Image: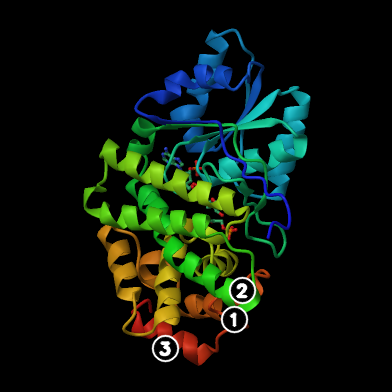
Amino acid sequence: MFEKSSWIRLPRNVVIGHGVLGETRAVLDDVHLTGDPLVVTSPTPREVAGERIVAQLEDAGRSPSIVTVSEASFDAVQRVIERAEDTDADFLMGVGGGKAIDIAKMASDTLDLGFVSVPTAASHDGIVSGRGSVPEGDTRHSVSADPPLAVVADTGIVADAPWELTTAGCADIISNYTAVKDWRLANRLRNVEYSEYAASLSEMTAEMLVDNAASIKPGLEESAWVVVKALVSSGVAMSIAGSSRPASGAEHLFSHQLDRIAPGKALHGHQVGVGAILCEFLHSGERGDWVAVRDALASIDAPTTAEELGVSDEEVIAALTSAHEIRDRYTILGAGISEDAALEVAAKTEVI
Ligand SMILES: NC(=O)C1=CN([C@@H]2O[C@H](COP(=O)(O)OP(=O)(O)OC[C@H]3O[C@@H](n4cnc5c(N)ncnc54)[C@H](OP(=O)(O)O)[C@@H]3O)[C@@H](O)[C@H]2O)C=CC1
Ligand SMILES: O=C(CO)COP(=O)(O)O
Ligand SMILES: [Zn+2]
């Protein structure tokens, strides 16, 4: 039965390849973004890509502005909004990792201006998603936002980024396995709206990444290709679902709580990867697929333990036992797991 309309909002141009940053102006023209952008970036991405975009657009007679953000916060979003208004920006470009892209995405959503995503690292699957993630008060998870009109992912730049950023992106994809399990569980137990297309795409993306894990190596541009495509695919799954459900379950709740309890210690992707080991154990038990998840993470050099994440055992247990409180999202954690159960799963999976 058709109960309501559903909007699947996707970028029109997703341009991935070596040196495509040099084609930015053509990509913008193709989606009729012919005015002057505000380029939103963070310190390192500014050096590796932001300044080059500004120079390219100035050479073409445009007058872009640039703003650097250093932390993902609503204050930063507000500063970007004010700067966009002051400079009379026609559209926004997010150039960097998840922080710069999400801030630009949220600001353009508020301003009702077009947005273009220029990832400089393959570190997260928000590159194409219609979700923005900026922590505010108790809210740490993503909320709905306009997706980019275009994406320009230069694999030369992405391959040169620190390897740990790429392994974080891989882990964000590997976490799709448990996210989809949680989604199916929530559909069965709570009648949560579910899309088999989105779930299958999300799982298939994780499957293909794991199948190609042996070819994902530091400094190899081909690896950047493989990972960026997987991140795009995962973002599309979120767009089809109209929520982050295909890519975010209890392992993300765990990571969001770690952000609160142990801020700045580890990358988002690495945290959700370790969360996926724990949650896979909770889903399928001691002899279940958690070993496969752990081995897949280890095979691409992603952390599999609290120590490798740089957090304490106590912080892991605190995050796991309080993760269910973070949002109204039914998962394998249900109404919460006890400290004893958390200690057991963390010890048996050797996370602590
Ligand atoms: N909207 C969505 O759907 C999703 C959003 N997210 C969000 O994304 C964020 C995680 O993204 P992540 O990219 O890990 O975080 P950041 O944007 O903080 O980037 C991590 C680090 O990478 C650095 N960096 C980026 N590009 C390069 C490069 N080319 N060379 C060297 N360093 C580089 C940044 O430098 P610098 O310090 O200079 O900024 C930063 O230190 C989280 O907030 C998460 O919630 C995650 C998944 C989905
Ligand atoms: O990180 C995400 C998907 O990988 C977004 O998920 P959240 O909605 O939990 O922030
Ligand atoms: Zn994620």
Q: Which residue is mark 1?
A: 334
Quarter holding residue 168: bottom left
Task: Indicate if the residue with disc 3 has its beta carbon within 8 Å of ligand 2.
Answer: no
Quarter holding residue 48: top left
Distance from label 2 to label 1 (Cα)?
6 Å
Residue at x 43%, y 19% (from the top left corner): 22
Q: Marks 3 and 2: which is nearer the front? A: 2
- In this image, 252 relative to 209: left or right? right
Q: Earlier in the sequence, mark 3 or mark 2?
A: 2
Q: Name the amino acid, label 2.
A: Tyr
Residue 106 screen position, x and y as percent: 68, 43
Task: Indicate the secondary structure of the residue bearing disc 1.
Answer: loop
Task: Indicate if the residue with disc 2 has its beta carbon within 8 Å of ligand 2.
Answer: no
Check whether the beta carbons of the residues at disc 2 and disc 1 lie within 8 A of each other.
yes
Task: Indicate the secondary structure of the residue bearing disc 2.
Answer: loop
Task: Indicate the secondary structure of the residue bearing disc 3.
Answer: helix
Q: Is residue 141 above or below residue 284?
A: above
Which is nearer the eye, 319 or 9? 9
Residue at the far bottom in the pictured view: 340
Q: Is residue 274 above or below residue 133?
A: below
